[in-house]
Image (cartoon, rainbow, N blue to C red):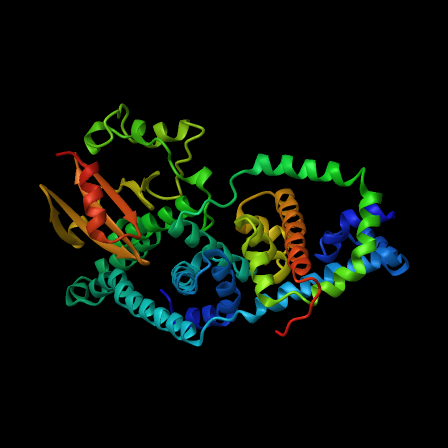
């Protein structure tokens, strides 16, 4: 191996990213070549210097306790939220009525199990949870931010006039097929109910999805009025969702900004 | 949903990385308060989406991913855009290096001794400045590779660019960093100062 090759691969060698063969060749060269070895030592020295400086920077102790406190509050929030989904079928199973009709008891339990296992999307908490997961996935590609592949730039043309007053040039209605064909427009369908269109609103991102489930129990969510319209708001995993119905379609807007701002934005999307 | 065990597991595997994340957050945001917020938010998101973490993969890389994403979303700093430019850059750099290699090597040999000596004169502030003056995508590359010792694969995963780009970015970052350090050392004129 020549000195210039060593020079070329030195960093990969130090990062332990070289194949065994090359690694050993380089190692051997370094043992024998004084100038290359010196260069290697210099590189090592620089790294040690940088590393020792950065390792000196440690998080203040109160940051640890704040994080723990945050986790505690999520735990509390989740224990409040999650039993709600499961209590219902249980209560049905153990209510006096079920004892009266023994045959239907069995049916109902079987049915209930089937319901939970296969129709996860049919209760509001799960649907919104899916919407939030979609939101995060689409925005962040499983928490990796990738602007090129996740944000719809010119969303106007994919929205129908009836859900949009601000973006006037709308021609085609929002639906899976429309959104999918456009190769450069990366609207993802993340394994659940609908495609997810992402809006850039200032520095925030909001995603709009259509909830296709007709049985979506929207009325179980907290209701609020904003302008002439009615909206339902809910929170999953720290993300807010604003949900509304329009011409038989249920829209779900998700973001991590506060609900008032979201309502305002939702109002610009929905028709007057 | 998040039982006691999940919480325990989460703390066990993530809490040891607070310092690493904090250091990165400081280097990215250049500000301690922002860095604290960023780290807090990272842990909040990580816990909320812990069910999406693939067991057996590098949890530190996963946390860095969330931190990076949080940072970009929050501060709208564009990292990792000019890929093509970067490649050209590297090509240029390489073509420059290979023919002149011998000369370069000679030159560096002459000064190497003094360079090693001189690095001892570099102050903590110089190191800080040398890192912080790097363009942001080089800065993060240096931290992921030289300080956190993540693999190229993990870094590619975090930053969402191909491994080749990661490699060239890291190399470019290192040579820039060394140049910066070397300049500081020269400015100090090899005079030792108390730390």
Question: Does residue B14 appear left or right of residue B195 in this picture?
Answer: left
Q: How many marks?
A: 0
| Left/right of residue A270 with respect to residue B70 in the rendered view | left
Residue at 32%, 51% (x, y): give it.
Answer: A120
Expressed as whole percent of the image width and height from the top left, the position of residue A132 reads 33, 50
Asked whether A52 or B144 is in front, the reply is A52
Q: Is residue A161 above or below residue B77?
A: above
Rendered position, A179 above or below B90: above
- Toward the right, the furthest residue is A32
Q: Is residue B148 visible?
A: no
The image quarter containing residue A42 is bottom right
Query: Which quadrant of the rendered structure holds the C terminus of chain A?
Result: top left
Q: Position of residue B7 (x, y in %)?
A: 42, 70
Which residue is at a point 44% across and 41% down the rendered structure image? A147
Q: Residue at x 40, y 43 (%)?
A: A190
* Residue A80: % across, % down: 26, 67
Which sits in the foreground, A4 or B121? B121
Percent from the top left, x then y, of residue B3? 38, 70
Front-lying residue, B44 or A223 = B44
């Amino acid at each position: 191996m020549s000195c210039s090759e060593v020079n070329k691969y030195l960093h990969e060698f130090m990062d332990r990213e070289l194949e065994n063969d090359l690694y050993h060749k380089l190692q051997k060269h370094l043992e024998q070549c004084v100038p290359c070895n010196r260069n290697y030592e210099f590189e090592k020295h620089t790294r040690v210097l940088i590393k020792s400086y950065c390792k000196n920077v440690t998080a203040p102790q109160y940051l640890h306790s704040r994080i723990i406190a945050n986790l505690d509050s999520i735990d509390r929030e989740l224990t409040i939220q999650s039993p709600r989904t499961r209590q219902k079928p249980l209560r049905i199973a153990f209510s006096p009525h079920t004892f009266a009709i023994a045959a239907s008891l069995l049916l109902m339990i079987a049915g209930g199990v089937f319901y939970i296992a296969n129709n996860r999307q049919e209760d509001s908490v799960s649907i919104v949870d899916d919407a939030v997961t979609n939101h995060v996935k689409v925005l962040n590609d499983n928490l990796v931010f990738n602007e090129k592949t996740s944000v719809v730039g010119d969303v106007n043309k994919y929205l129908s006039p009836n859900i949009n007053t601000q973006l006037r040039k709308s021609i085609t209605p929002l639906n899976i097929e429309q959104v999918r064909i456009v190769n450069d427009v990366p609207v993802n369908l993340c394994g659940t109910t609908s495609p997810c269109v992402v809006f850039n609103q200032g520095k925030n991102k909001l995603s709009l999805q259509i909830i296709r489930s007709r049985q979506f129990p929207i009325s179980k969510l907290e209701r609020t009025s904003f302008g002439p319209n009615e909206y339902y708001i809910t929170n999953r995993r720290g993300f807010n969702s604003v949900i509304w119905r329009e011409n038989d379609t249920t829209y779900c807007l998700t973001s991590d900004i506060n609900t008032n701002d979201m309502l305002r934005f939702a109002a610009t999307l929905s028709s007057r | 949903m998040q039982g006691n065990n999940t919480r325990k597991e989460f703390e066990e595997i993530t809490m040891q990385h607070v310092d690493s994340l904090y250091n990165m957050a400081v280097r990215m945001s250049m500000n301690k308060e922002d860095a604290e917020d960023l780290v807090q938010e990272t842990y909040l998101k990580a816990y909320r989406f812990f069910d999406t973490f693939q067991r057996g993969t590098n949890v530190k890389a996963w946390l860095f991913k969330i931190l990076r994403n949080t940072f970009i979303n929050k501060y709208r700093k564009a990292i990792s855009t000019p890929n093509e430019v970067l490649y050209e850059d590297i090509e240029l750099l390489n073509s420059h290096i290979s023919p002149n290699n011998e000369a370069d090597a000679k030159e560096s040999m002459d000064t190497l001794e003094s360079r090693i000596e001189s690095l001892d004169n570099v102050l903590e502030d110089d190191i800080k400045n040398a890192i912080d003056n790097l363009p942001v995508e080089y800065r993060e590359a240096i931290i992921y590779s030289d300080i956190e010792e993540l693999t190229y694969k993990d870094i590619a995963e975090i930053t969402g660019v191909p491994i080749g780009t990661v490699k060239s970015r890291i190399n470019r970052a290192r040579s820039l960093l060394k140049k910066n350090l070397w300049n500081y050392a020269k400015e100090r004129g090899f005079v030792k100062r108390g730390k």
